[in-house]
Image (spheres, rainbow, N blue to C red):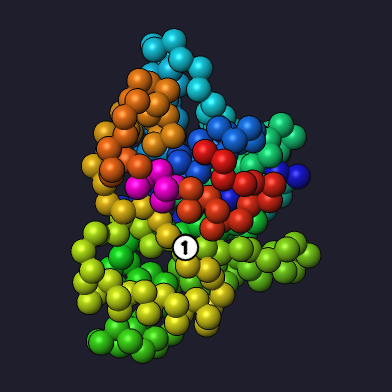
């Protein structure tokens, strides 16, 4: 069976689509077959990223390893079982279509609570939650006291993940490996940055996730999106001399893939 990686939280602007595209493309470049779904049916940022890549490669005459994007199939009323949710049916059909031919299925969730996102979380073998280095985003996971030191209790997203874990346990599936990424970090050492690190380490022990390094805030990510490219593609398009920022970003991606500890994957790029 394909290993399902879900990238999600319930807040926009944390870099979910950038993280999804880089993980999916890194796996494809390492020889794995990767199928991808975008559950943000309105914005489809991840879907546009993959489409941009397809268009750029066709125009450039390049053939670079890429994930396979799949739209959720439509469903007619007569295809539904009594009481079945149409979104559940569409997601199940998409997974069933991708699973036989792929080693990994990457699912990018919208930055809000939806039925599709809720179901996707219960399917996750690996859950990746990118988080901006801010207590505004931390509030999605847990409530803290005014000093940011004492955790008062879990918040809405953590409760949703807990429910997904319960559903998997009831179905006899293995537990979700939940990884929270400290994403879009600034280069400067700040008191807030240190407090966030301590709060995440505290919370990780209480509600059961691992903390992993994400990406620093870099202009390069905004420049890559229109062409559908990732950090690993730069040399293939003629960028033979990487600047210090790009080299550091590639190392961040390598560290991220290593931290995910996916089955059969060894970062070799």
On the image, the x and y values in percent for residue 200 come to 41, 75
Q: Compare residues 156 and 137 and report the one nearer the observer.
A: 137
* Residue 251 in magenta stretch: yes
Please tell me in which quadrant of the rendered image residue 11 appears. Answer: bottom left
Q: Compare residues 241 and 255 and report the one nearer the observer.
A: 241
Q: Look at 35% across and 47% down and name the residue there.
A: 248
Which secondary structure lies at badge 1? strand
Residue occupied by mark 1? 212
Please tell me in which quadrant of the rendered image residue 236 appears. Answer: top left
On the image, the x and y values in percent for residue 20 come to 47, 44
Q: Look at 48% across and 53% down and name the residue there.
A: 256
Query: Is residue 65 visible to the viewer in this orientation of the structure?
Result: yes
- Is 114 displayed left or right of 72 in the figure? left
Most common secondary structure along the magenta stretch: helix
- Range of residues picked out in magenta: 248-253
On the image, the x and y values in percent for residue 151 come to 39, 86
- Is 167 displayed left or right of 160 in the figure? right
Q: Look at 68% across and 66% down and name the residue there.
A: 175
């Amino acid at each position: 069976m394909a290993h399902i990686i879900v990238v999600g939280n319930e807040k926009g602007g944390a870099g979910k689509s950038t993280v999804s595209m880089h993980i999916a493309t890194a796996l494809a470049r390492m020889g794995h077959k990767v199928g991808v779904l975008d559950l943000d049916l309105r914005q489809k940022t991840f879907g546009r990223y993959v489409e941009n890549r397809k268009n750029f490669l066709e125009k450039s005459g390049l053939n670079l390893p890429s994930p396979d994007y799949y739209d959720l199939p439509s469903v007619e009323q007569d295809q539904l079982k009594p009481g079945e949710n149409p979104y559940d049916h569409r997601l199940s059909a998409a997974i069933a279509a991708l699973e036989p031919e792929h080693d990994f299925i990457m699912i990018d969730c919208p930055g809000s609570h939806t039925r599709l996102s809720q179901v996707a979380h219960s399917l996750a073998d690996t859950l990746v939650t990118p988080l901006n280095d801010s207590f505004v985003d931390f509030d999605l996971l847990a409530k803290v006291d005014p000093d940011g030191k004492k955790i008062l209790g879990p918040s809405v997203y953590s409760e949703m993940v807990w429910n997904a874990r319960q559903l998997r346990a009831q179905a006899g599936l293995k537990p979700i490996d939940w990884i929270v990424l400290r994403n879009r970090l600034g280069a400067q050492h700040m008191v807030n940055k240190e407090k966030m690190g301590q709060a995440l380490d505290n919370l990780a022990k209480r509600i059961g996730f691992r903390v992993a390094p994400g990406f620093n805030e870099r202009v390069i990510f905004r420049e890559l999106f229109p062409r559908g490219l990732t950090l690993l593609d730069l040399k293939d398009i003629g960028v033979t001399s990487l600047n210090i920022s790009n080299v550091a970003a590639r190392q961040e991606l390598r560290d991220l893939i290593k931290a995910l500890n996916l089955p059969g994957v060894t970062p070799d790029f």
